[in-house]
Image (cartoon, rainbow, N blue to C red):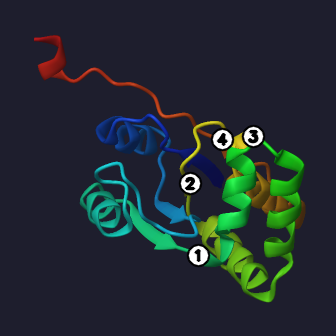
Amino acid sequence: MLNTIGYEGADLSDFIETLKLANIQTVIDIRDRAQSRRPGFSKSALSKLLSESGISYQHYRELGDPKEGREAARANDLSRFKAIFSKVLESDAAQAALKKVIDVAESEVVCLLCYERDETHCHRKLVADKIETMTGNKARHLGVRRFESDRKRA
């Protein structure tokens, strides 16, 4: 099963708890650069934390939005953003990565990861749409839920 999630504005513990609640087995990071200013969301730290939570991590840079696409999205030029990223999806490298994602999703509950909370403003929606077209299976877009820990209640 294919899911997607963005970590924008999310607390790291709430992010992990949301993945667990959704029974995610593998997170597939589709950021061009798997780095983040947010503590815990860069590739190495996130991979380690996910592993400790029983969730595997894979990074497919081939499905990342290039700098020009990110700039167009930030400028709210969504038609330019979609045009740029559509060319990425047509590349041989992206097509091979899509097939790998589909292979994993056939036997595991996977979740495509990127930054933006709203999938309609993120390239992960375009990746999910492409996979839906290729497989006929609908993707589920997760939002990070907020969880109250015992220490927050005290």
SS for callout 3: helix
Which residue in the structure is indicated by mark 2? 114
Q: CA distance from mark 2 to mark 4?
A: 12 Å
Give me the disc on residue 120. Answer: 3
Q: CA distance from mark 1 to mark 2?
A: 11 Å
Give me the disc on residue 61. Answer: 1
| Mark toward the start of the polypeptide (2 vs 3) | 2
Of the residues shown, which amino acid type is indicated by label 2? Cys
- In the rendered image of this protein, does residue 63 appear above or below residue 144? below
Dividing the picture into quarters, in which one does residue 93 lie?
bottom right
Image quadrant in which the N terminus is located: bottom right
Dividing the picture into quarters, in which one does residue 16 lie?
top left
Left or right, residue 124 beside residue 5: right
SS for callout 4: strand
Few, some or many residues within 10 Å of mark 4 (<14, 14–19, 20+): many
Of the residues shown, which amino acid type is indicated by label 1? Arg
SS for callout 1: helix
Label 3 or label 4, whichever lies nearer to me, is: 3
| Mark toward the start of the polypeptide (3 vs 4) | 3
Of the residues shown, which amino acid type is indicated by label 4? His
Residue 128 image position (x, y, % from top left) = 75, 56
Q: Residue at x 28, y 54 (%)?
A: 53
